[in-house]
């Protein structure tokens, strides 16, 4: 019998996989290994001292705390904005839809300068908040606002296609069976968009954790108050403390990986529970 040959639908799988793994190693794996090796050159005692000083711990609390809060806020209001863009027609809708992508196109330093100009004591918004005793610029609140600004598009653009594909007939059927609008949303719409919503949350959180340009201007960079962890890494690098900078980077990497792993696990569990597992 002649030997049978198996044909793949996509030719060149081995070659494509080889190129993919090579580029993945060069761009991702090798730099990560280098970071861990450089941090490991400190030794355990020096490593712990480098990543647990009061100033560094304060930056962890601000960076991860503000990132989580910003991602949660963006999840709520991103869903509302995506819902309005998909389900309603109103004057200026195309302009609003285009403005959602502004943080993607705007250089982060420009965003930081613009937010600082708006929320400073003499800014358009800051001078209105000053009589109320609310100071935004050069405080942790300013950091939070900057992170909300840069993270909102991730939630909107992740949820929006799901809402566009969702047929309104399911909601109408639920209402015809006696459900009110809130019950129809909670039991029909929300389970459908929840996996995408969790994805948007994870993306907004990941972007916020590593954000630098739009935050340093409005933060004020006050030690133990408004210093973010990426700034601490830059400070260590400027002092030629490369091992100390990579040690802090390793901590950020591990914490971010664990949080994103939990979020992805929750997303997979939700998709399985709702019958939308891929």
Image (tube, grey):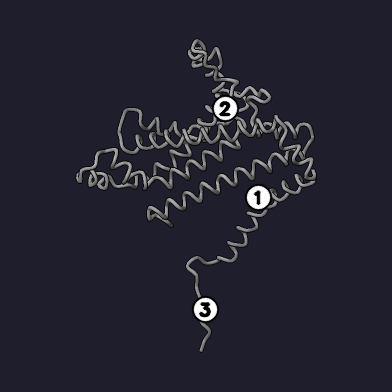
Out of 254 and 84, give the one closest to the viewer.
Answer: 254
For this view, does 86 lie left or right of residue 264?
left
Q: Residues within 10 Å of mark 3 (few under 14, many from 20)?
A: few
Residue at 60% of width from left, 33% of height from top? 63
Q: Which residue is mark 3?
A: 5
Q: Which residue is mark 2?
A: 143
Disc 2 to disc 3, how far (Cα)? 60 Å
Instruction: Single out the mark in the foreground, 2 or 1.
Output: 2
Quarter holding the C terminus?
bottom left
Disc 3 to disc 1, how far (Cα)? 36 Å
Q: Splitting the image into 4 quarters, where does residue 116 fall?
A: top right
Q: Which residue is mark 1?
A: 27
Instruction: Single out the mark in the foreground, 2 or 3.
Output: 2
Q: Residues within 10 Å of mark 2 (few under 14, many from 20)?
A: many
Marks 2 and 3 close (CB-CB < 8 Å): no
Q: Residue 184: horizontal and vertical position, in percent? A: 28, 42
Residue at 38% of width from left, 55% of height from top? 275
Disc 2 to disc 1, how far (Cα)? 30 Å
Q: Residue 127: horizontal and vertical position, in percent? A: 51, 12
For this view, does 91 lie left or right of residue 110?
left
């Amino acid at each position: 019998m002649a030997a049978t040959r198996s044909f793949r639908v996509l030719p060149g799988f081995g070659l494509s996989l080889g190129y993919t793994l090579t580029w993945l190693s060069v761009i991702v794996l090798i730099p990560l290994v280098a970071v861990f090796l450089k941090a490991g050159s400190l030794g355990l005692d020096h490593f712990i001292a480098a990543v647990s000083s009061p100033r560094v711990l304060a930056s962890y609390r601000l960076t991860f705390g503000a990132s989580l809060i910003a991602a949660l806020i963006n999840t709520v209001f991103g869903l509302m904005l995506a819902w309005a863009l998909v389900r309603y027609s109103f004057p200026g809708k195309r302009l609003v839809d285009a403005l959602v992508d502004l943080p993607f196109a705007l250089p982060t330093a420009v965003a930081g300068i613009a937010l600082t100009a708006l929320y400073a004591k003499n800014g358009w918004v800051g001078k209105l908040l000053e009589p109320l005793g609310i100071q935004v610029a050069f405080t942790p609140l300013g950091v939070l606002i900057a992170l909300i600004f840069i993270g909102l598009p991730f939630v909107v653009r992740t949820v929006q296609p799901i809402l566009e594909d969702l047929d309104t007939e399911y909601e109408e059927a639920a209402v015809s069976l006696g459900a009110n609008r809130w019950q129809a949303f909670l039991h029909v719409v929300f389970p459908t968009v929840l996996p995408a919503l969790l994805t948007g949350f994870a993306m907004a959180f990941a972007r916020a954790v590593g954000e630098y340009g739009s935050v340093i201007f409005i933060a004020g960079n006050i030690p133990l108050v408004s210093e973010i962890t990426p700034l601490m890494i830059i400070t260590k690098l400027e002092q030629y403390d490369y091992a100390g900078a990579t040690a802090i980077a390793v901590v950020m990497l591990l914490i971010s990986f664990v949080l994103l792993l939990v979020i992805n696990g929750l997303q997979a569990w939700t998709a399985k529970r709702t019958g939308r597992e891929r």
